[in-house]
Image (spheres, helix red, strand yellow):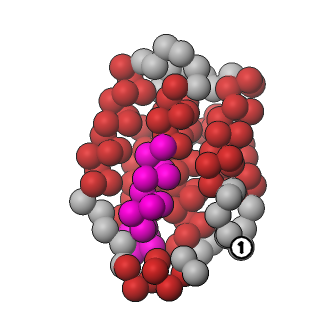
Amino acid sequence: MTPTENLHYAIGQLAYAIAKADGQVQKEERQKFANIVAAELRCKDYGFNITDIIFKVLDDEKFIKSQDAYDWAMNQIHTNSHYLSPQLKETFIKVLQKVAKSYPPVTIDEVNILEKFQKDIADIHGDPIYYNNHAK
């Protein structure tokens, strides 16, 4: 996968971590989860199918704990951070907030993951030469 694909896979993992924080991801939740992530990210002009990435995350779900998904995703974000634009960071936060709110109530575990992510990602700054050249 490319670094940009890795970042999107990572946000899929983070969204999954939030969805799973309050228990098993139910069938209806899976579809809503996939729809939220795909709707927020598919509008970009990527050379890959974001929906395929999200369903790959969901297919792996029975083997992944919420904390493991979070740790893996943050590792990928750090590894590929030079490709992370401020706009992409905002989109990722928006996706996670929508996933957390998609099945009320928003639990304390979901809030904790979201707050941790916002704190962890705050100091990560991509390379403007890369993302400005690729935004055109």
Q: Is residue 103 above or below residue 20?
A: above
Residue 65: say if magenta. no
Q: Is residue 14 above or below residue 31?
A: below
Residue type (three-letter) at the residue carrying disc 1 = Gly
Q: Which residue does the image show at 40% across and 48% down from the upper left?
A: 71
Q: Which residue is mark 1?
A: 47
Q: Is residue 83 at all visible to an observer of this figure?
A: yes
Q: Is residue 35 above or below residue 136?
A: above
Which span is picked out in magenta? 80-94
**Residue 13 percent location from the top left of the image:** 54, 47
- Judged from the image, the secondary structure of the residue bearing numbered disc 1 is loop
Q: Quadrant of residue 129?
A: bottom left
Looking at the rendered image, the quarter that the N terminus falls into is: bottom right
Q: Nearer the viewer, residue 107 or 43?
A: 43
Q: Residues within 10 Å of mark 1 (few under 14, many from 20)?
A: few
Q: Residue furthest front?
A: 136
Looking at the rendered image, the quarter that the C terminus falls into is: bottom right
**Residue 76 percent location from the top left of the image:** 45, 62
